[in-house]
């Protein structure tokens, strides 16, 4: 039963993230959350704390990324120690509706006392470099200071 509740909360938070609302996801984080996104792309991150992670999530939304959880596995019975694994696909659609980026991966996390304490993403990092290239070719630039994405007029 507890695993079902955790899965429901994750799906709800992801649905809201896909709609552009990061607040439910932020509320689920511990203040000192640790997030790792691998690779050499502009998306790569080793973040400590909600504030830094909020900026990363705002960029995720602004870039138009859509996350689709396919399977959620929850292990642990105790509220102070739960492991969560989410198999998911993320994608970006271009203005004409065709897929310009798609990747499959796994997110592995730890929930402590009902808050996400840490999580790490495992995916094809070369495809993420391809997303950087797409953004650069279409006038989207990353502001490295704030992780904000801004489109430039041609």
Image (tube, rainbow, N blue to C red):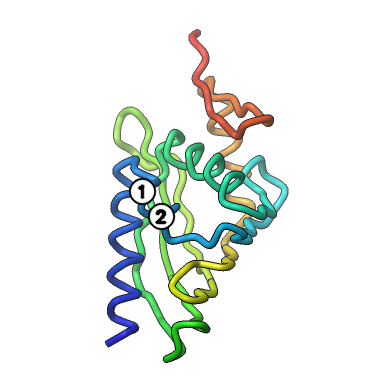
**Label 1: how many Cα within 10 Å (few below 14, some 14–19, many 20+):** many
60 on left or right of 4: right
Could you say where residue 43 lies in the image, as x and y percent from the top left? 62, 44
Q: Gap in Å between the C-alphas at discs 1 and 2? A: 7 Å
Disc assigned to residue 17: 1
Residue 52, position in %: x, y?
Answer: 61, 45
* Left or right: 80 as drawn, with respect to 71: right
Residue furthest to the bottom: 77
Looking at the picture, tell me which residue is in the foreground, 81 or 150. Answer: 81
Q: Residue 25 carries which label?
A: 2
Q: Which of marks 1 and 2 is nearer the N terminus?
A: 1
Pick out the residue farthest to the top: 154
Residue 119's quadrant in the figure?
Answer: bottom right
What residue do we see at 42% from left, 39% from top? 61
Q: Quadrant of residue 143?
A: top right
Q: Nearer the viewer, residue 100 or 139?
A: 139
Q: Which residue is drawn at 49% across and 20% down?
A: 151
The label nearer to you, 1 versus 2, is 2
Element marked by disc 2: helix
Q: Nearer the viewer, residue 30 or 45?
A: 30
The 10 Å Cα crowd at callout 2, few under 14, some 14 to 19, many 20 or more, is: some
Asked if the residue under mark 2 is in contact with the one under mark 1, i.e. CB atoms within 8 Å, the reply is: yes
Q: Residue at x 36, y 53 (%)?
A: 24
Q: In this view, does 67 lie above or below 51?
A: below
Q: Under tag 1, what secondary structure?
A: helix
Up/down of 145 relative to 92, above or below: above
């Amino acid at each position: 039963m507890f695993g079902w509740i955790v899965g429901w909360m994750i799906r709800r938070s992801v649905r809201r993230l896909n709609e552009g609302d990061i607040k439910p996801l932020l509320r689920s984080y511990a203040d000192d959350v640790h997030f790792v996104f691998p690779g050499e792309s502009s998306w790569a991150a080793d973040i400590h704390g909600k504030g830094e992670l909020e900026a990363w999530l705002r960029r995720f939304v602004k870039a138009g990324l859509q996350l689709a959880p396919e399977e959620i596995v929850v292990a642990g019975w105790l509220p102070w120690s739960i492991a969560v694994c989410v198999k998911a696909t993320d994608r970006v659609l271009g203005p004409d509706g065709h897929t310009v980026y798609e990747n499959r991966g796994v997110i592995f996390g730890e929930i402590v006392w009902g808050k996400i304490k840490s999580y790490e993403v495992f995916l094809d990092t070369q495809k993420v470099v391809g997303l950087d290239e797409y953004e650069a070719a279409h006038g989207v630039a990353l502001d490295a200071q704030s992780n904000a994405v801004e489109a430039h007029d041609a």
